[in-house]
Image (cartoon, helix red, strand yellow):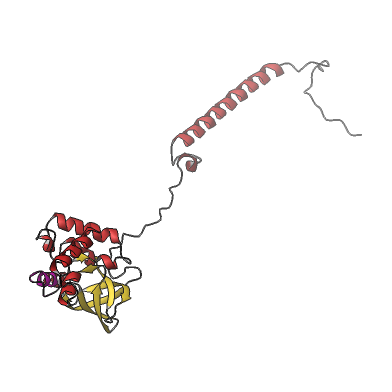
Amino acid sequence: MMQRPTLWPPGPVPRPGTLPSGFGSGTGLGLGMGLTLGLGLGLGLGLGLGLALAMPGVGLAPALARPAPRAVTPQPAPQERGASEPGGLPATVLSVGDGDSLRVNQAGQVLTIRLACIDAPEMAQRPWGEASRAYLQARLPRGTAVTLLPHTIDRYGRTVAEVIDEININLVLVEDGQAFAYRRYLGNCNAREYLDAEFRASRHRAGVWQLPGGITRPWLFRQLRRGQAANPIAWRLQDFRRFQR
């Protein structure tokens, strides 16, 4: 016959509802130490978590303290106007005819270019025509790489275009008083830019504006030579009225 295991050491059997002697004091001490230890561990974990959140890059979760930097997309550098002008045709200057015409090599083809939007003095309008040609030659020596912005083909077979060499050469000629804004053909141009440039040139008495009111306009000069403006007084009045527009 098997014996039941002894649950208590030999001695008096405790009464129901009571604990063995000595059990209360030992258990109380153990519970007190456990509570103290638990509070200590909780306080330590709390302090550790607080430091981790307060110090970027240190602790349990550094990503919460400092957001990851955003990737910066590089922006293209501003592009100067030149051979890469949108819609333009790259070409190389061969020679300058006068203040508003030149020859270029474009993809192996020789083109005669009539500068759009402007009208430079005729060579017969001395010394203004010669000065305008010399100015353009200095701006665009032989071999200069330019961009053509074609507008149309004129009745002489010339390509009417704006010529870009980092800046708009047509506009610079007007700005520096070496040509007039060609009002009759400003429809395909930025008319305000050309008229404003002409106004500034007149205010500074630059080039063709050294004479009061400017020299005879080239288009009227050509009419006079063809005999289409036989009356000099009426011709000059027509010149003045066109200038006022």
Q: Position of residue 119 (x, y in %)?
A: 21, 69
Task: Tell whether position 113 is magenta.
Answer: no
Point out the image quarter for the C terminus.
bottom left
* Residue 64 visible in the displayed image: yes
Q: Position of residue 48 (x, y in %)?
A: 50, 33
Instruction: Check the image and report above or below for 25 versus 220.
Output: above
Point out the image quarter for the N terminus.
top right
Asked whether 212 or 98 is in front, the reply is 212
Query: For this view, does 158 lie left or right of residue 179?
Result: right
Task: Tell whether position 129 is magenta.
Answer: yes
Query: For this view, does 141 lie left or right of residue 146?
Result: left
Quadrant in which residue 192 is drawn = bottom left
Asked whether 13 or 174 is in front, the reply is 174
Instruction: Check the image and report above or below for 244 versus 102.
Output: above
Quadrant in which residue 210 is drawn = bottom left
* Residue 178 visible in the displayed image: no
Which residue is at the far left?
127
Q: Position of residue 242 (x, y in %)?
A: 22, 62
Which residue is at the far right?
1
Quadrant in which residue 207 is drawn = bottom left
Instruction: Check the image and report above or below for 61 versus 30.
Output: below
Look at 40% across and 53% down and name the residue there. Answer: 72
Asked whether 17 or 59 is in front, the reply is 59
Q: Position of residue 185 (x, y in %)?
A: 28, 68
Stretch of the chain drawn in magenta = 123-133
Look at 26% across and 76% down and name the residue there. Answer: 91
Asked whether 149 or 227 is in front, the reply is 227
| Number of numbered labels in the structure image | 0
